[in-house]
Image (cartoon, rainbow, N blue to C red):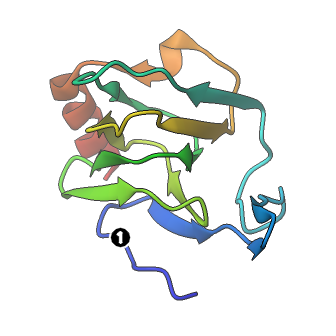
């Protein structure tokens, strides 16, 4: 499968292998070189109320691989100079979000469940939660 390229720095689509038969479908993510990092943490988003958002921050160091398990949402990606919005709606495609990328998840379909594989353990000091501060820090690293 040919995956579309992204304009946002440090972001890319990953193909998630899978199989389907009369019983249903299975997809799997192997923690190999294609992932690009050793996973340190898994978390998932679910039960998101209508009209709510998740994210709205950037990370100084963390890499995230984001997969939709069920449903769909939109993801805004912003590296401080380029911004684009993509749909997360296919369990056979994962979104790799690298460091210094502001990301916002919105427009969740009912019953959406999102799995995130992270390269770091949780550390609040690693988060950039103010967009203007993020842009300043991103500009220094560009």
* Quarter residue 128 falls in: top left
Q: Is residue 62 visible?
A: no
- Residue 84 located left or right of residue 4: left
- Residue 112 located left or right of residue 58: right
Identify the residue at image location x=61%, y=66%.
Answer: 92
What is the residue that sits farthest to the front in this orientation? 22
**Residue at mark 1:** 6
Secondary structure under badge 1? loop
Identify the residue at image location x=27%, y=23%.
Answer: 50
The percent coordinates of residue 73 (x first, y second) are 35, 45
- Residue 65 located left or right of residue 100: right
The percent coordinates of residue 21 (x first, y second) are 79, 75
* Quarter residue 137 falls in: top left
Q: Relative to 33, say whether 82 is above or below.
A: above
Q: Relative to 52, say whether 118 is above or below.
A: below
Identify the residue at image location x=78%, y=32%.
Answer: 40
User: Which of these two is toward me, 74 or 35?
Assistant: 74
The percent coordinates of residue 78 (x first, y second) are 26, 48
Identify the residue at image location x=77%, y=41%.
Answer: 39
- Quarter of the image for the N terminus: give it: bottom right
Q: Residues within 10 Å of mark 1 (few under 14, many from 20)?
A: some
């Amino acid at each position: 499968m040919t995956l579309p390229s992204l304009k946002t720095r440090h972001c890319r689509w990953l193909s998630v292998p899978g199989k389907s038969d009369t019983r249903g479908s299975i997809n799997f993510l192997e923690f190999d070189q294609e992932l690009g990092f050793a996973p340190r943490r898994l978390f998932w988003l679910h039960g998101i109320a209508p009209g709510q958002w998740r994210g709205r921050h950037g990370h100084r160091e963390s890499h995230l691989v984001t997969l939709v398990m069920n449903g769909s949402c939109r993801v805004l990606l912003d590296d401080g100079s380029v911004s684009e919005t993509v749909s997360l709606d296919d369990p056979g495609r994962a979104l790799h979000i690298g460091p210094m990328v502001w990301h916002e998840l919105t427009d969740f379909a009912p019953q959406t469940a999102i799995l995130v594989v992270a390269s770091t353990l949780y550390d609040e000091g690693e988060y950039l939660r103010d967009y203007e501060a993020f842009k300043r820090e991103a500009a220094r690293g560009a």
